[in-house]
Image (cartoon, rainbow, N blue to C red):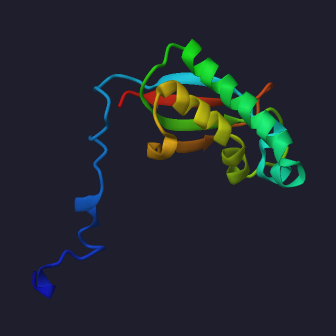
Amino acid sequence: MAGGDRAHPLRDRAAHEPSHSAVSRPVGEHPLRVELPWPPKELTPNARRRNHWRVTQRHAKKYREDCYLWTLSEGVRSGKIVSITFVPPDRRRRDDDGMIGAFKAGRDGVADALGCDDHTFRPAYHFAEPEKPGRVIVEIANG
């Protein structure tokens, strides 16, 4: 291939990006919503540095199992996480990467329930206004 025949990385970007019409679910079908409990404070990245690894592991294992069971109880057996919405329990200052990191064990639990590895998920993250008792809303689409 000659040098002039190669695609320009910026000019031809649209040809390589997926279109919005290529969604993997039938038209009119909405993703399933699973509401999960708010992650324990021991799973936040800052707490992980302060706590002994066994303390963190115990909380991560329980939260992963809880999220697995909540997902199964909603009747979800397959699919792919397309959206995760964090609804904090209070107005404390939290950054987005801290909430995402604290939910890692929960995401693994949902993936266990779906029977797949979570490395294929590329969800959209949303951050809502606080509401008691706090929760994480996961939307799962067929695929």
Give 63 or 34, whichever is nearer the viewer. Answer: 63
Q: Residue furthest front?
A: 54
Question: In the rendered image, which quarter is residue 9 located in?
Answer: bottom left
Q: Which residue sits at x=77%, y=40%?
A: 57
Give 57 or 119, whichever is nearer the viewer. Answer: 57
Q: Is residue 134 visible?
A: yes
Q: Which residue sits at x=29%, y=51%?
A: 18
Indicate left or right for 117 with 51 as reference: left
User: x, y (%) of residue 52?
Assistant: 88, 48
User: x, y (%) of residue 86?
Assistant: 67, 37
User: x, y (%) of residue 1?
Assistant: 10, 80
User: x, y (%) of residue 128?
Assistant: 67, 37
The vertical placement of 29 against 20, above or below, is above
Q: Which residue sits at x=68%, y=53%?
A: 97
Indicate left or right for 102 with 46 as reference: left
Give 69 or 2, whichever is nearer the viewer. Answer: 69
Question: In the rendered image, which quarter is residue 11 located in?
Answer: bottom left
Indicate left or right for 78 with 17 as reference: right
Q: Is residue 88 visible?
A: no
Q: Residue furthest bottom?
A: 3
Q: Which residue sits at x=79%, y=34%?
A: 59
Indicate left or right for 40 with 11 as reference: right
